[in-house]
Image (spheres, coloured by chain):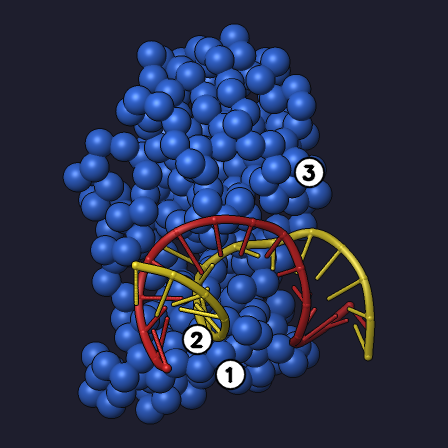
Chain colours: A blue, B red, C yellow
DNA sequence: ATGCACTCCTGAACGC
DNA sequence: TGCGTTCAGGAGTGCA
């Protein structure tokens, strides 16, 4: 469940479970994720106390009092879940803390875990080139327009470029473009300043809505899985091909861009 | 520099 | 029931 709102929800759910807790055993059951897990993962984490949990783009950062930070990315199918009983299939890494066992569960194994020096975490190659956080003031109409200027790629592809703005994925790209009434297939370079302003606002709206929805949904479940938070969210266009546009009533359309599904209202978005 | 196809992996849903 | 095909929320790499 990998876009910014879902990672934010996971981070918020992990905080009360881990912050202030001393990490016990760390068991690696499957070291081959997106990148091989560091050999010293367990040694470095065991005995450390979690001091803070942060989010950057779609990454979560778990800081410890040993100046190490555990960086995680959920990929397409990653979740954290509290283990009840034995570890199951795809529970790749088990982390004991506070009398509980947390499992990093990821069937497709596109997720990743890294161990970084906390002080230099932002300099890591995976984080260094990320664009602004979409919910920060740094993500402005001027900044977006500047990033779009002269670019021939589509509006949708621009939003998915993590160097332009960090944290938007395939679902919320469609959602934001619909809310801003922008055609996903239009060249990004044709964006006016007024359209950039509308898109910035729409991105913020859909992300904040999703964070609110994820948080409330997850509270129904006693574990920080997050799966439910994603599926129960009510999307405006994503996954609704053929259904009526909530604005004009005409059928929504699905088409493929760069090998991925895009949903839009051909009548409302230009 | 820019844009895009390919690639990693498994599971679910669907058609025959 | 089983088998093959297609699709899925990510993103680094390498190529044109």
Helix, strand or loop at label 2? It is strand
Q: Secondary structure at mark 1?
A: loop
Please report the residue visible at 21 percent of the width from the left and 37 percent of the height from the top. A221
Disc 3: which residue: A124
Where is residue B7, by image quadrant? bottom right
User: How many marks do you count on the picture?
Assistant: 3
Which subunit holds the residue at mark 2?
A: A
The image quadrant of residue C16 is bottom right
Which residue is identified by label 1? A185
Q: CA distance from mark 1 to mark 3?
A: 33 Å
Q: Mark 1 or mark 2, which has the lower sequence index?
A: 1
Residue underneath mark 2 = A262
Q: Residues within 10 Å of mark 3 (few under 14, many from 20)?
A: few
Residue A231 x %, y %: 28, 56
* Chain letter belonging to callout 1: A
Neighbours of disc 2 within 10 Å: few (<14), some (14-19), many (20+): many
The residue drawn where x is 39% and y is 32% is A88
Q: What's the residue at 65%, 40% (across, down)?
A: A35
Does A94 sit above or below residue A189?
Answer: above
- Answer yes or no: do the residues labelled 1 and 2 have beta carbons within 8 Å? yes
Under circle 3, the secondary element is loop
Q: Earlier in the sequence, mark 2 or mark 3?
A: 3
Give the spatial CA distance, label 2 vs label 3. Answer: 31 Å
Q: Say yes or no: labels 1 and 2 on the same chain.
A: yes
């Amino acid at each position: 469940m990998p876009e910014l709102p879902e990672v934010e929800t996971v981070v918020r759910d992990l905080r009360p479970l881990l912050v202030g807790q001393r990490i016990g055993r760390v068991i690696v059951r499957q070291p081959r994720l997106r990148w091989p897990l560091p050999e010293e993962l367990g040694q470095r984490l065991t005995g450390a106390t979690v001091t803070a949990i942060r989010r950057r783009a779609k990454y979560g950062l778990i800081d410890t009092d040993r100046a190490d930070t555990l960086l995680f990315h959920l990929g397409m199918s990653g979740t954290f879940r509290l283990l009840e009983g034995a570890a199951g299939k795809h529970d790749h890494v088990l982390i004991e803390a506070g009398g509980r066992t947390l499992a990093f569960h990821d069937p497709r194994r596109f997720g990743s875990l890294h161990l970084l020096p906390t002080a230099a975490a932002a300099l890591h190659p995976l984080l260094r080139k990320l664009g602004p956080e979409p919910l920060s003031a740094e993500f402005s109409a001027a900044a977006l327009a500047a990033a779009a200027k002269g670019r021939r790629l589509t509006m949708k592809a621009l939003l998915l470029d993590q160097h332009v703005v960090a944290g938007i994925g395939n679902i919320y790209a469609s959602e934001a473009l619909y809310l801003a009434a922008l055609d996903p297939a239009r060249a990004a370079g044709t964006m006016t300043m007024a359209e950039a302003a509308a898109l910035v606002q729409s991105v913020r709206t859909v992300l904040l809505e999703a964070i609110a929805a994820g948080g409330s949904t997850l509270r129904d479940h006693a574990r920080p899985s997050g799966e439910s938070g994603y599926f129960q969210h009510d999307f405006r266009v994503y996954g609704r091909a053929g259904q009526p546009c909530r604005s004009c009533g005409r059928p929504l359309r699905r088409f493929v861009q760069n090998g991925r599904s895009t949903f839009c209202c051909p009548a409302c978005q230009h």
